[in-house]
Image (cartoon, grey):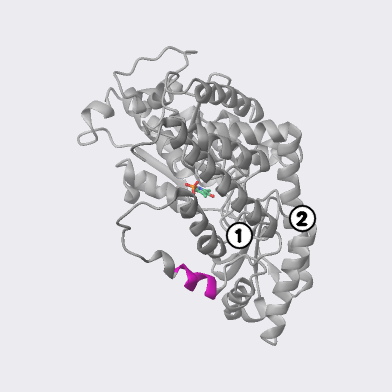
Amino acid sequence: MKTLCAHSKLSLSKRAHEQGSQHAGTYFDGLADRRVAPAQSDIQAMDVFSESLPLAPSDPSEVVTMLHEHGSPATVASAGARFFGLVVGGSLPACVGVRALTAAWDQLATTQLTSPIAAQLERTTSQWLLDLFELPKDSSVGFVTGTTMGNFVSLAAARHQLLHRQGWNVEQQGLSGAPTLRVVASQEVHFTVEKVVSMLGLGTDLIEYVPVDSNGAMQAEKLPKLDDRTIVLTQAGNVNSGAIDPIGEIVERAKQAGAWVHVDGAFGLWAAASESKKHLISGFEQADSWVTDGHKWLNTPYDCGIAMCRHPEAIHQSMATAAPYFEVGEFMDAKDMMPELSRASRGIDVWAALKSLGRSGVQGLIDQCCEHAVLMAKGLEDLGFDVLNDVMLNQVVATYAADESMVSRIVELVVDSGEAWFGVTHWQGKQAFRISFSSWVTTDADVLRTLKAIQNAKESLNL
Ligand SMILES: *Cc1c(COP(=O)(O)O)cnc(C)c1O
């Protein structure tokens, strides 16, 4: 390598990239029909990776080929059509293609200077997102690793703003001796939000929990008295039922009191992109901050979350690397609006998704997933299962009421069969399983094939 010229060195990259593309092609060709969970034998075959650190270099293309030969079979086919876990979807075609190109670019999306194209596409995509969700045009948009970090950024801004109003600069003075902030969340708040509350020193013991209705949405009338030191954490998309909190009603109460309302919309925020679903989330645009994932319902690759905030200056004050200085309407470098300094341009992935889908394509994706959920729920009922949630979005929670203890056995058999992948959950005191529809790849036929696998599992247990 030492004696090669730059031309020759880069031809190694080109060859390795071509090798990767060729294997990716083979992988895609097999994806629709392969097992979703890998077979035990494929997991055992990963033994080749349990070697000690190589002493000498290997041919880069051979490294890629080794990964394909022994690694590809040990993947979970979450990029395929019958993975229904964790509310994530496969990557859209344009995203897959763009990733191949951006692998060659290797851009540092830190500032306009380190990558003009990344900065440009993140600017464009930010406006598109605000447009799509009908949020204030001068809101800030940050492309982070996921909703967990998006919640972190948003709540850091909330912490800044509420304490600033109390005459306290939390970034400089810290939390000890600071006025206490209150955090109000529903009993069904996602566990990663509690993690963020702990990371920000707000204290999980201090969370004031609000009861939920039978579908897992916060009961607005049960909110405690709010004040201007309170952060209210609402949720769009309960990870089990898909329920969306009555955000409009919550915002109304919170605004009067001067509280900050945050929307964790990891997947549920996308309801706003569908004409037939947007009524479920009405009023959310009045909140102070919103977070959603790219890598869940928008089907971008990992890891990609989007943090949006009505108060860009509060984001800047809590995230700026140099002395914070902000003028409304100014374009801030990414490094001053989010935690990371060196980072990939996740905005390019979101750009590729939105550019290839367009407004109608996004709506089509959301609506199709919701229709699959209805089809699945109906099929499960025909098979003698009880659907426990109100299927108004992309989630189905079901149990086998005749013998709840059989639920985990049924799920295990389906996953072992390789036909589909979903998990067990607890829902309102019941042992249940959850099937999430978030992938552009899934078709009606895949829903029916999954139902067949569930039926086979049930029959093999003589149920
Ligand atoms: C998935 C999810 C999260 C966490 O998002 P990540 O992208 O995995 O960090 C938070 N809240 C809700 C409601 C979720 O569904």
Please name the residue shown 70% across and 34% down the image: 356
For the residue marked with disc 2, what is the amino acid?
Thr
Q: Nearer the viewer, residue 162 or 57?
A: 57
Residue at x 55% of width, y 38% of height: 250
Q: Answer left or right for 251 relative to 440.
A: left
Mark 2 Cα shell of 10 Å, populated few (<14), some (14-19), many (≥20): some
Location of residue 116 with respect to 12 vertically, above or below:
above
Residue 314 position in % (x across, y down)? 40, 24
| Magenta highlight range | 40-46
Dot 1: element = loop
Q: In the figure, 365 relative to 74: above or below? A: above
Is residue 356 magenta-colored? Answer: no
| Residue wearing tag 1 | 77
Residue 411: mark in rendering: none
Q: Which residue is mark 2?
A: 443
Q: Residue 417: horizontal and vertical position, in percent?
A: 64, 74
Instruction: Say left or right for 230 vs 98.
Output: left
Q: Is residue 218 above or below residue 344?
A: below
The earlier-in-sequence mark between 1 and 2 is 1
Q: Position of residue 425 (x, y in %)?
A: 55, 66
- Badge 1, how many Cα within 10 Å: few under 14, some, many 20+? many
Is residue 243 depicted above or below 164 in this figure? below
- Distance from the alpha carbon under mark 1 to that under mark 2: 15 Å
Q: Amino acid at mark 1?
A: Ala
| Quadrant in the picture for the N terminus | top left
Report the mark closest to the observer, 1 or 2. Answer: 1
Secondary structure, magenta segment, majority class: helix
Depth order, front residue of 311/297 = 297
- Residue 169 in sight in this render: yes
- Residue visible at 35% across and 27% down? 318
